[in-house]
Image (cartoon, helix red, strand yellow):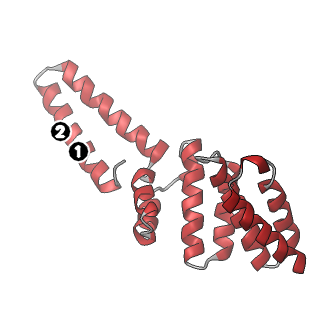
Amino acid sequence: MFSNKARLFVISIFMIMLVFFTWQRVYQLAAFCLLMLVLIIIEYFKQGTLVLAAKYYHIKDYTKTEELLNQIKKPEWLNKKRRGFYEYMMGAICLHKHEFDAAEHHYELAAQYPLRTLNDHVAALVHVANISIRLGKYEKAETYLQLALKDKEKITAKMLAVIDRLKQELKKH
């Protein structure tokens, strides 16, 4: 929920409070400050700056989203549910920048993790299939479209229309 600068500021405040309360021999408050420090550090490794990045992603400010996502030094340490969303947003940013190979990689990773809804998962698979068609990897595109249709009855009509369009384009090749 914090940017890295805000996180460092809060950590420094709690460190000062920890030293002060220890010096004043108020050990209960010192223990509380230590607990808060530990929680802030754990939260950095489990969630990073994803909450803020998601805020900018939803208003389509991809520059700020990318800046916040790049603050996460070890995305493999993120919580499983957060990692999928991280990869999904990175895929969208790469797609927006026309870096198709990187976008394909990020969407493939996003599809391996749990996402918010089934449609988000299907969207990641469809993005991989679409990029694969554009790059001439037709077998891979067919495989990902089949994976996307695995739960066909739960997919929205809009997503089914996109899948049908991609299947028609795939038939041309």
Residue kind at label 1, given as amino acid type: Ser
Residue kind at label 2, given as amino acid type: Ile
Q: Distance between the Cα atoms at labels 1 and 2?
A: 6 Å
Q: Position of residue 109 (x, y in %)?
A: 67, 56
**Residue sitting nearer the eye, 123 or 48:** 123
From the viewer's perspective, tell me whether residue 41 is left or right of residue 69: left
Up/down of 14 relative to 100, above or below? above
**Residue sitting nearer the eye, 47 or 142:** 142
Residue drawn at point x = 37 percent, y = 47 percent: 1
Q: Position of residue 60 (x, y in %)?
A: 45, 68
Q: Position of residue 4 (x, y in %)?
A: 34, 54
Up/down of 172 relative to 127, above or below? below
Residue under label 2, please give it.
16
**Residue sitting nearer the eye, 9 or 83:** 83
Residue drawn at point x = 58 percent, y = 46 percent: 116
Q: Secondary structure at mark 1?
A: helix
Q: Quadrant of residue 43?
A: top left
How packed is label 2: few (under 14 Cα within 10 Å), some, or many (20 or more)? few
